[in-house]
Amino acid sequence: MNIIRILILTAVLTVWCGCSGEKGKAAGSKVVSLSPAATEIVLALDGKPALAGRSSACTMSRAAGIPVVGDMGLPFAEPVLSSGAQTVLTDSVAPSLAWMQLEKCGMKKVVLPGNKLDDLPSNIRTVGEIIGKKPQAAQLAGKLSQHICQLRRQVPAQQKRALVVISLPPVVSCGADSFIHEALLLAGAENIAAGAGKGYFAVSTEFICHTDPEVIISFLPPGMTEKYFSRNEFRNMTAVRNRQIFYPDPDKFCRLAPQLPAEISKLKSLLAGDIRQK
């Protein structure tokens, strides 16, 4: 039965390929974005007219009206092919036969690197070239490169030991191979989980208490975070005792997108006590 379904899907997609090929010739620089970061870059370049589809994770208000043609890093083959786009932009790729079908039909896949802050300006230039916004991309990339260089020149001498909370329970944090780790250092936060693993991973209660962070940087709602860290095992932890929990905007800090350098500067001011957290 599964073989029959695959054969039917292949036949249907073959028809879509022919149709989408004609649409692609007319559309030129139309793209589909399957990651919020890529969508943010397209929108920052005033490229919304070139955005033929987005992922279900691209929930920013400026993307309203753009059809959903996939999930995060996961295309829905038929909607993507019928969108008129020639290129799929993403920064992650979920395993799926749909990618094979799209490539078979001539759809180009561009995977934007997303591990380092320096990937941001180059990603902007890449997207700008694809959607026909090369001058705008060069200007924005240059501006953000300068901002990142300025942040690197002015890294706070006194780094605060920080627990980064991506999700819970359990507490999921990040390693030194992530752009979030680098962003935190520029803001004045020393990631206590830097050497505990790669990418994003769970950290134990024992590890957290032993390293005794001075601050908690949470990308979750305050109510959820405070309830979790009100548990008895955390009551003597420095960050909890001093009520040093900060909440950067996850849509700005956890995406390798144009808003990130400004959000780093904001967190830097919060940690230094220059501004109050709202």
Image: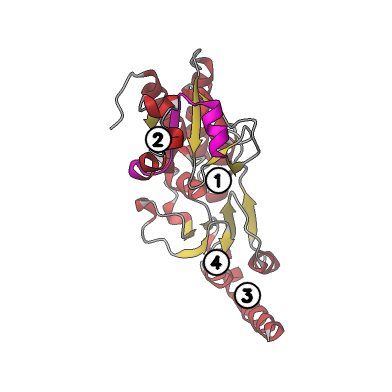
Instruction: Answer whether labels 4 and 2 touch (C-beta < 8 Å).
Output: no
Q: Is residue 153 visible?
A: yes
Question: Within the image, what quadrant is residue 268 found in?
Answer: top left
- Please state the extent of the stretch shown in magenta in the rendering: 204-223
Q: Earlier in the sequence, mark 3 or mark 4?
A: 3
**Left or right of 183 in this view: 243:** left
Checking the image for residue 18, the label placed there is 3
Report the residue marked by disc 4: 80
Name which residue type carries label 4: Val
Quarter of the image with the N terminus is bottom right
Report the amino acid beneath label 2.
Pro
- Tally the numbered discs: 4
Q: Is residue 278 above or below residue 88?
A: above
Identify the mark nearer the N-term, 1 or 4.
Answer: 4
Q: Position of residue 169 (x, y in %)?
A: 49, 48
First in sequence: mark 2 vs mark 3: 3
Badge 3 amino acid: Gly
The amino acid at mark 1 is: Val
Q: Work out whether residue 266 can be spotted.
A: no
Q: Secondary structure at mark 3?
A: helix
Under circle 4, the secondary element is helix
Query: Which one is earlier in the sequence, the residue at label 1 or at label 2?
Result: 1
Question: Is residue 216 a member of the stretch shown in magenta?
Answer: yes
Q: Residue at x 49, y 26 (%)?
A: 213
Please report contact status of discs 1 and 4: CB closer than 8 Å, yes or no. no
Whether 133 is drawn above or below 80: the answer is: above
Q: Which mark is residue 238?
A: none
User: In the image, what residue occupies the spot 46% across and 23% down?
Assistant: 214
**How packed is label 1: few (under 14 Cα within 10 Å), some, or many (20 or more)?**
many
Mark 1 or mark 4, whichever is nearer to me: 4
Q: Say which residue label 2 marks.
A: 248
In space, the residues marked 1 and 4 are separated at their CA atoms by 18 Å
